[in-house]
Image (spheres, rainbow, N blue to C red):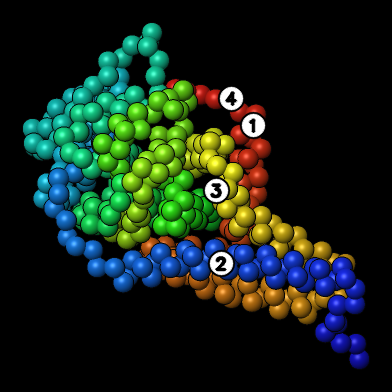
Amino acid sequence: METIITLPTSFNQWAILIVLLVAFCIQMLYQLRYIQLFKKEKKTNHNIKTEPVSIVICVKNEECYLQENLSLFLEQEYPDFELILVNDGSEDETETIITEFQKRYPHLRSTKIPLDDKFQHNKKLALSIGIKAAKNEKIIFTNIHSKPSSSKWLQEFVDSWDKGVHIGYANFENKKGFFYNFLKFDLLSKNIKSAGFASSGNAHSGNGDNLGYKKSDFFANKGFVKHSHFEAGYDHLMVFQLAKLSGASVCLQPEAKINLSSICAFDQWIRINRHYYKCRKYLPFKIRLLIDLEPISKMIFYSISIYALLFTHLYFFTAIIYLTRIILIRSLFKISTRHLKEENLFLSSYLYEIFVLFSKIYFLSTNFILSKSNQWK
């Protein structure tokens, strides 16, 4: 009777098993680092803060979202905040809607960039104007097509703000659909990875839908001058630059989540990824290497596993390593989804993980051939 347990008989076979184990260990190290974030969040008792803060939202022809979401930001359970709307040349009823809201909410302020076809600019100008208009040192940035998950979003976000830059959690709102949840899984993974790097002193990215930094740091960095020529970078590159001045903290409380609209979710996901990959080339090689080491280890792990099953007799050892990886890494991932209340992503994550690898290859390759656009559309 032939046994399925066949020991390696050559150097190549031993090398295959060693490579599988090394790739598995690299992934485990990353996952353990991410899990420490959630354990730290549970143990940390943040003091309730009441310092004045400013929220800056830039709008451009988004009257429907203003009607639907603006009150959710204005009615946050926080004692002292202002909300500044920057109307960037809207041609719809945006200005009228803002005026109506100001009658009901005295802490709503607004400023306007006149429409001028001869003067082309991107979102960074609108953000700069909003920052200059802010009265407070700490400024939170979000978008009107997004909405806070609860009325305690602002309080939870500010309570955990311990350093200059503060990175919050943003993802699509809950909705059924295999493909839609893949988009959520990808953003969940990006959020966790971004938070993990930030907590280890290597902050390099953040989401402009839920991000905060200090007004004084912004001007000390000379605003967006270093990358004002292109649209991307108002969140990722600013996080990287400002974190070097005063560090970065993270907020992974589910009550402090910003929900992205499910309308045109695929277009939003494409935009988020394209902006991220446009900014990658400005990062130091060391950080890019650390970012890529985990997905590269996954690609190697899957490739070597398939090769071992097809062209060697190491079925037993390959299966043991593969099953061990599934059990341990998926168990750690479940801690993340449970903490962030994204449990609906867990079961499908086995397939999503592979799809994400292909999406990374796609965005890395298309980043070299797609033309750059400086216009905020």
Q: Is residue 168 left or right of residue 101?
A: right
> Which structural element holds mark 3?
helix
Place of residue 177 in the rendered image (x, y in percent of width and height, measured from the top left): 50, 55
Q: Which residue is mark 1?
A: 368
Q: Is residue 361 left or right of residue 376?
A: right
CA separation in Å, label 1 and label 2: 31 Å
The quarter of the rendered structure image containing the N terminus is bottom right
> Which structural element holds mark 1?
loop
Q: What's the residue type where badge 4 is placed?
A: Ser
Q: Which residue is mark 4?
A: 371
CA separation in Å, label 2 and label 4: 37 Å
The label nearer to you, 3 versus 2, is 3
CA separation in Å, label 1 and label 3: 20 Å
CA separation in Å, label 3 and label 2: 16 Å
Q: What's the residue type where badge 1 is placed?
A: Phe
Q: Which mark is residue 287?
A: 3
CA separation in Å, label 3 and label 4: 25 Å
Question: In the image, what residue occupies the spot 80% across and 68% down?
Answer: 16
Q: In terms of depth relative to the viewer, which is nearer, 7 or 257?
A: 7
Is any atom of residue 111 visible in this view? Answer: yes
